[in-house]
Image (cartoon, rainbow, N blue to C red):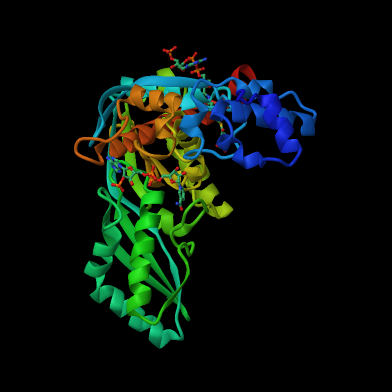
Amino acid sequence: MTEPTPASLADRVSEGEIRFHELEAHADANTAAAARRRLVSETADADVDALGEYAFDAADAHGSNIENMVGAVQVPMGVAGPVAVDGGALSGERYLPMATTEGALVASINRGCSVVNDAGGATARVTKSGMTRAPIFRVADVAEAEALVSWVRDNEGVLREAAESTTSHGELLDVTPYVVGNNVYLRFRYDTKDAMGMNMVTIATREACDEIEAETDASLVALSGNLCSDKKPAAINAVEGRGRSVAADVEVPREVVEERLHTTPESIAEINTRKNLVGSAKAGGLGFNAHVANAVAAMFLATGQDEAQVVEGANAITTAETTPEGDLYLSVSLASLEVGTVGGGTGLPTQAAGLDILGVRGGGDPAGSNGDALAEAIAVGALAGELSLLAALGSRHLSSAHADLGR
Ligand SMILES: CC(C)(COP(=O)([O-])OP(=O)([O-])OC[C@H]1O[C@@H](n2cnc3c(N)ncnc32)[C@H](O)[C@@H]1OP(=O)([O-])[O-])[C@@H](O)C(=O)NCCC(=O)NCCSC(=O)C[C@@](C)(O)CC(=O)[O-]
Ligand SMILES: NC(=O)C1=CN([C@@H]2O[C@H](COP(=O)(O)OP(=O)(O)OC[C@H]3O[C@@H](n4cnc5c(N)ncnc54)[C@H](OP(=O)(O)O)[C@@H]3O)[C@@H](O)[C@H]2O)C=CC1
């Protein structure tokens, strides 16, 4: 039998003989992707050859990372740093890998890193950890809602045993109930170690839900009831945390602010208050920061994180003040940074290289330490970005920087 070619496969799809999304059952994944490019190209009347330039075996991505694969989008990657970090899990000097198409962004964070180094380095710590899944149950009325809440409080051990039967790494930390009339939301929170954990906690919570339905009158409406809350702006994540809550800070001597950043500690502190705090409050924002999403998104893409979770990663508050000595104290606290160094996109070769640059690829020793270290690295990237952008606003260099580097 002759080997299928992209052209022969595309013809068979066009004739209705095989399905577009089942091409991998008839050819290797790279050939299947090439066949889809032909079909897409014909339908759209577009040249999509550039999508076929990728540096991994499609078989490694198809089925676990992507369906209907046609190729890959390439995002340029740069590094900022190296930057000196004193973290709970990450210590030493690190380059920060960043994938972006926004000119001036890496330059800005690079400047921030250089100034952080001049200040003696940044401190970073993970202060809370736990990935959540919150199923919604239907009950008859509020009396039954209270009965379910009591049952959950009395039977956390039962739920833990059921949930943890599905994973050798995950640990159920707690279950917090929320009642709205005849709706009961149970927010399960897990230590997922080095995994971001959404697959892990979804599978584990499903097992616990079976137990609840067997032992109570409640009916599961949906495994996710949006109090989790995954991939949506939500105050619960900003207040309670989700994934890792991580903070970083630095104290920058006045002369370094003046010489390297062309502004003053007072100016940076004032801009932070009027822009990041008052301005965000007036806007009804959840992110009381300047551009934490920039560092989060660029490092997420560079290290194989789930890019939709930049939504939660941007739940961050930046504080800036002048110390009694006249220096600048700057901090950034990310309430809900959802990261992993195993699973998801972390195993793809270019993303794994991003993790290798930080020295955090794969499972940590102890388990969870690589996830913590990645969170600390991203927090330091965000801190450097806040420092540089606030300074650029203070020195009125924002528009000229982007005119020079960003277009
Ligand atoms: C562009 C700079 C850094 C110039 O800043 P500068 O101080 O004029 O530059 P410099 O030539 O004196 O260099 C200072 C340091 O910056 C770095 N640096 C300088 N140039 C480069 C480069 N080409 N590539 C890599 N690194 C660079 C480098 O570390 C260098 O130190 P050195 O190594 O020379 O000792 C500065 O003006 C700046 O940071 N501007 C702010 C830009 C910024 O932060 N943009 C972020 C994106 S804005 C956005 O997306 C969100 C927004 C703004 O809408 C959010 C909001 O509402 O606030
Ligand atoms: N299902 C959903 O609702 C959602 C899924 N996602 C997707 O989920 C994926 C991420 O889920 P996630 O569960 O992290 O990844 P995976 O589904 O890839 O699972 C990771 C698994 O790795 C194993 N593992 C090996 N070493 C370690 C270690 N050191 N620490 C922790 N686990 C380890 C664990 O197996 P074991 O459990 O057997 O111990 C763990 O369950 C992403 O692709 C994301 O896009 C995103 C949002 C929602």
Residue at (34%, 32%) from the top-left corner?
A: 377
Residue at (39%, 87%) from the top-left corner?
A: 143
Farthest-out residue, front? 1
Look at the image and tell me whether residue 26 can be seen. Answer: yes
Where's residue 132, x and y in %? Answer: 38, 56
Q: Quadrant of the C terminus?
A: top right
Where's residue 80, x and y in %? Answer: 42, 21
Residue at (43%, 38%) from the top-left corner?
A: 269
295 shown above or below 243: above
Where's residue 320, x and y in %? Answer: 39, 39
Q: Nearer the viewer, residue 114 or 272?
A: 114
Farthest-out residue, left? 366
- Direction from residue 351 to residue 245 in the image, left or right: left
Residue at (53%, 49%) from the top-left corner?
A: 280
Where's residue 119, x and y in %? Answer: 31, 24
Q: Quadrant of the N terminus?
A: top right
135 shown above or below 318: below
Look at the image and tell me whether residue 114 can be seen. Answer: no
- Direction from residue 154 to residue 42 in the image, left or right: right
Q: Nearer the viewer, residue 316 or 299?
A: 299
Q: How many marks?
A: 0
270 shown above or below 3: below
Q: Nearer the viewer, residue 195 or 284?
A: 195
